[in-house]
Image: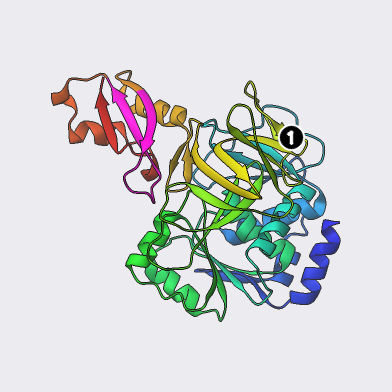
């Protein structure tokens, strides 16, 4: 099935630009040629947009599983044999706060691509401008996989600076701009011109907007793909319309159970009372469902959502202890005063107040990525 889809794309768009990034461009025919090389075992998709596209194409056309990995993360070896029909492996923290692998068939991935294509009302002349990570579910399916399955042009930016976004948008007559709440805030303050954007999409956290930018919230989980879309509002929770093909019901626990053809095959390690597979995923979302509308108030999982990037408190704790020792007692989250950041990392520490200096914090955070650095330190 995939082979015929891809060959049709190459036949229609062979000499058109498929992916543009600051250092190079590649056409659909060149992607086709570069992905003909086979492989054994599984393929690792990591790096820039072009490198990832070639890796994913190689896997799909040769029926070899592809594991999508952030360039700054180590590869996680799945803890179980791959389920039959696995095509794509995501390694993510998600709302659970546990880093693990998720498995998807080609049909499940394709269903999510189709749903997002329809939800964002894309047409073939649109360019997708994506100054976001393509290894996250959002960037992967709304950006990179739209190139492979739908023949869309992707303009990927490794940095989301306003000047770079302005220059990228100026290159296209019609564009769909993908961002997260913190980026939309920065672009708004910098007055990035949005006149030629046919779609202004935010994901990763509920977006609060009072600047009239006509933004859409695309909501979903890595396990299910996109599930709903709504307009930005002045509320801190998400409210939107369920997308066609997605059902949602309230579980007795209060959490929302999602059902669709894009729900993955399962995790490589399962916690008690989890549901993920056979078309159903019991999320950590808490809210209500009525008349095809989804309204979410909060998330119960331990994962920390910092501006749309999900962090594991266990991983942050281990890195802090490796640098500062056992005085680091606990890592947890609190709601951020800045709605675009969503949540903040907090550290509880067993230390005399006079010892909690700037130099101590700098040393303790030396193994952390910038987005993992705690905003608050609490003396036990």
Tally the numbered discs.
1
Residue 114 shown left or right of residue 5 in the figure: left
Would you say residue 367 is visible in this rendering?
A: no
Residue shown at 54%/30% (left/top)?
98
Residue shown at 38%/71% (left/top)?
163
Residue 61 shown left or right of residue 318 in the figure: right
In the displayed orientation, state which residue is furthest to the front: 291
Residue at disc 1, secondary structure: strand
In magenta segment, residue 339: yes
Residue 214 shown left or right of residue 260 in the figure: left
Residue indicated by mark 1: 277
In magenta segment, residue 57: no
User: Magenta region: which residues?
Assistant: 330-349
- Chief secondary structure of the magenta span? strand
As displayed, is residue 214 above or below residue 172?
above
* Quadrant location of the N terminus in the rendered image: bottom right
Would you say residue 267 is visible in this rendering?
A: yes
Percent coordinates x, y for residue 171 in the rendering:
51, 79
As displayed, is residue 352 above or below residue 42?
above
Residue shown at 74%/62% (left/top)?
149
Nearer to me, 292 or 120: 292
Residue 38 shown left or right of residue 127 in the figure: right
Percent coordinates x, y for residue 93 in the rendering:
54, 36
Residue shown at 66%/59% (left/top)?
116
Percent coordinates x, y for residue 319 in the rendering:
39, 30
In the displayed orientation, state which residue is furthest to the left: 354
As displayed, is residue 330 above or below residue 32?
above
Percent coordinates x, y for residue 240 in the rendering:
57, 53
Nearer to me, 315 or 228: 228
Q: Which quadrant of the figure has residue 348?
A: top left
In the displayed orientation, state which residue is furthest to the bottom: 173
């Amino acid at each position: 099935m995939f082979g015929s889809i891809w060959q049709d794309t190459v036949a229609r768009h062979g000499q058109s630009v498929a992916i543009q990034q600051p250092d190079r461009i590649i056409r659909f025919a060149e992607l086709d040629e570069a992905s003909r090389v086979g492989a054994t075992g599984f393929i690792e998709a990591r790096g820039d947009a072009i490198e990832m596209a070639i890796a994913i194409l190689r896997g799909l056309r040769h029926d070899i599983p592809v594991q999508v990995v952030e360039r700054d993360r180590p590869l996680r070896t799945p803890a179980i044999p791959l389920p039959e029909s696995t095509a794509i492996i995501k390694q993510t923290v998600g709302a659970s706060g546990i880093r693990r692998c998720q498995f998807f068939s080609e049909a499940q991935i394709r269903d999510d691509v189709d749903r997002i294509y329809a939800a964002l009302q894309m047409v073939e002349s649109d360019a997708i401008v994506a100054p976001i990570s393509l290894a996250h579910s959002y960037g992967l399916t709304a950006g990179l996989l739209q190139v492979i399955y739908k023949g869309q042009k992707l303009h990927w930016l490794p940095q989301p600076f306003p000047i770079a976004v302005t220059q990228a948008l100026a290159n296209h007559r019609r564009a769909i701009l993908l961002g997260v709440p913190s980026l939309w805030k920065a672009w708004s303050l910098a007055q990035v011109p949005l006149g030629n954007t046919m779609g202004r999409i935010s994901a990763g956290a509920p977006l609060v907007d009072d600047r009239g930018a006509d933004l859409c919230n695309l909501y979903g989980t890595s396990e299910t793909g996109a599930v709903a879309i709504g307009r930005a509002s002045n509320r801190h929770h998400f409210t939107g319309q369920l997308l066609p093909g997605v059902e949602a019901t309230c579980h007795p626990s209060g959490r929302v159970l999602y059902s669709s053809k894009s729900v993955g095959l399962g995790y490589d390690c399962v916690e008690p009372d989890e549901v993920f597979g056979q078309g159903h995923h019991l999320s950590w979302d808490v809210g209500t469902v009525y008349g095809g509308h989804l309204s979410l108030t909060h998330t119960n999982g331990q994962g920390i959502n910092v501006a749309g990037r999900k962090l594991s408190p266990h991983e942050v704790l281990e890195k802090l202890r490796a640098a500062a020792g056992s005085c680091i007692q606990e890592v947890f989250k609190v709601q951020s005063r800045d709605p675009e950041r969503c949540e903040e990392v907090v550290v509880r520490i067993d230390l005399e107040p006079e010892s909690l200096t700037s130099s101590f914090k700098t040393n303790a955070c030396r193994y952390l990525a910038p987005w993992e650095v705690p905003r608050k330190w609490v003396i036990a």
